[in-house]
Image (cartoon, rainbow, N blue to C red):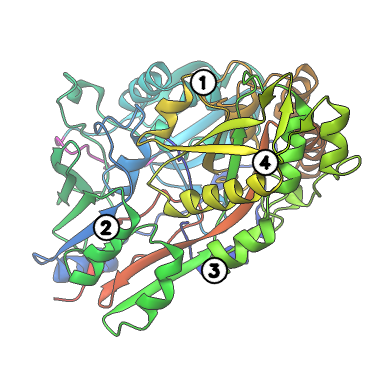
Amino acid sequence: MISNHSRRSWLICTGVMLLLAVMALSGCTSNKTSNSSGKDENASAQQTATGKKLVMAYTWKPSGVDPHGDNNWDVMRSGAGETLVRLNEKLEPVAWLAKEWKQDSPTVWTFSLQDKVTFHNGKSMDAASVKASLLRSIEKSHLAKDLLNVKSIDVSGPLALKITTNQPNAALVSNLADPSTTVLDVASMKDEQSYPAMTGAFKIKAFSKDQSLVVERYDGYWGEKARLAEATMKFITDGNSRLMALQSGEVDVATDIPVDNAEVLKKNDRLQVLSAPSLRTHMLVYNMESPVFKDAANRKVVDSLIPRTSIVSAVMRGFGTEASSPFPSILPFGKVERKALDGTADQLLTKDGWQKDAQGTWTKQGKPFEVTLLTFPQRPELSVMAEVIQSQLLKEGIQVKIRKVENIDEALTKNDWDFAMYSMLTAHTGEPQYFMDMFYSSKSEANVSRYSSKPLESILNSLKLAKDTAQRNAVTLQALDIINTDLPQSFIVHPDNVFGVKKGVEGFTPHPIEYYYITAQSDIAE
C-alpha cells in the first residue's frame, strides 16, 4: 500500500503552512462540519457537467480495485471511494460520510451518518451497511484492524453507529479517514473480479491490470456532482515515461515527476509544475536480520556517512529538507536531532573488529563490508539517492550492490537484502500514531525492518492512552529518542511533492496526505 501510503505530496503550499494548527480531538467534544455540497453548487455543477475527460499518468500499478485490500490508496485517489471522515488541508478530521460524532467514554464513540447517500449500485447507505463495510475492512486489511482496534460496532439507529474500541484510542476519528476504511456495499463484492459499489463522485467503469483504471461520473452522487464525465489513471511506473507522456499531450496530469525535470516543465508554456512540502519521508530501512546490519554499530556508521545536504541540493534540486526523524520539523513532535557518533566512523568500525585491506575496503574475519541495497522505479529520485549513497560509502571502504525491484513491498518480505530505499507518508493525520503503530509494532506486517523493542512498544501503548496533544507530543519524542538510538532506519529527506499539469486543468490541488487526487472539483478546459 505504501506508499505507500507513501506518500508522499500531495498539497496546497499555503495549506501546508497551517499544519502547526493541527488539533487533536478533545475527550467528549462533538464535531459538526458540513460537507461542501449544496443546492447552488449542485446546480452549477450540473450546468458544467459535459463530456470532459481527464487522463493522469499514475505512479503505481494496483493489482485490483478492492478498497479493503492493498490497493485502497489507488481507489481513493480515483475519486470513487469515500470514508466516514475526511482530512482537510490543516489535517483536521472533518465530516464526510459521517456528519458528526462524539466520544461517549474513553472507549466508546457515536457517529451520525449523512442521509440520502447511495452506493454506485443505487442502494441506500445506512448504519447497517456501513457496519458491514467496516467489519469487512477490518477482516481484509491488517492496517484497518490495527488502526481502529475495534471491540464492537453496533447499529444504534438507521443512521447511527456506536464504535467501541478495545482500549482508549484518541486517534480513532482521524484513523477513520484512512483509505482502508472506505465504505462500500459489501454485497457488491461477489468475487475478486467485481467492481465495488462505493459512494464517491465517480464510479469504476473499467479496470485493466497493469494498464489503467477508468472512472465515470456517478449521477446519483449525494454531494456536488463531478465536473468531469470521465477520468483515467494510466499506470506508468517509470518517472521519465510519465514526464514524456505529459510533454507529448498523451496525459493531462503526471504524478511524482522527476525533480530534475521540474525546471524543464516550467519553461513549457503549455504546462505547469505544482509542488509543495509534504509529510513524506524518504529513508533507508535496514534489515535487522542482515548479518551486517543486525549490528547497531554498522547501521550508525552508514547513517553518519549519508550526504543529506548534497542529496537535498543535487538530487532533490531543493525540493525537500533534510530529515532527522520520520516526521518533518513543521510538526511539534518532529523537532528532534540526529544522534552524533561516539567518535569517527573509522574509530567505530575499528573498535567493532573491522580492518581496512590494501584496497581500502573494510573487512572482518576475511569478509568485506559488502551489502545489498534495494531500490524501485516508482519514485525515481530514490534510485538516484541510492547511487549517491553507494558512491559515498565506496569512498569510505564499504561496498554496495544496488538491486532494482519492481515491487518494493514484496521484495522486503524476503531476506536477501541488507538495506533498502523506502518512502512513507508518516504523519498523514497530523499525529504520529498511525505511522508508529504500522512501522514499529513487532506484530505489524508493515514493520519492514523486522525491528523489535520492548521499551518502544511500551511507549507506543502509552501513546494510545495519552489524553491531550501535549502529552501525545511528549510521548512521541520519547519514542523517537529510542528510534534514533537504535536506528532501524536512516531518515534522509522530507521531499516536496512535484506534479506536472497541463494548463487548463483545474481542481487538481496536491493534498498533504496524498489521498485526494481526482475529486468532484477536478476539471479541464475543453
Are dots 1 and 4 in contact, CB under 8 Å? Answer: no
| Closer mark to the observer between disc 1 and disc 4 | 4
Give the image quarter of residue 56. Answer: bottom left
Residue behind mark 2: 241
The reply to whether residue 218 is in sight is no
* Residue range of the region highlighted in magenta in the rendering: 113-122
The disc, 4 or 2, on the residue closer to the chain's N-terminal end is 2
How far across and how far down the image is residue 277, in percent?
56, 62
- Is residue 119 within the magenta segment? yes
Mark 4 and mark 2: Cα distance apart in space: 29 Å
Mark 2 and mark 1 lie on one chain; the one further toward the N terminus is: 2
Q: Nearer the viewer, residue 327 or 215?
A: 327
Label 3 neighbourhood size at 10 Å, few (<14), some (14-19), many (20+)? Answer: some
| N-terminal label among 1 and 3 | 3
* Residue highlighted by disc 1: 445
Quarter of the image for residue 263 reads bottom left
Instruction: Report, in whole angstroms, how far the alpha carbon at label 1 lies from the one at label 4.
Output: 20 Å
Query: Given the image, on which type of amino acid does mark 1 rest?
Result: Glu
Secondary structure under tag 1 reads loop
Relative to the observer, which residue lies in front, 304 or 108?
304
Quadrant containing the C terminus is bottom left
| Label 1 Cα neighbours within 10 Å, binned few <14 / some 14-19 / many ≥20 | some
- Residue in the picture at 61% in, 62% down: 312
Chief secondary structure of the magenta portion: loop
Q: Tell me which amino acid carries mark 2.
A: Ser
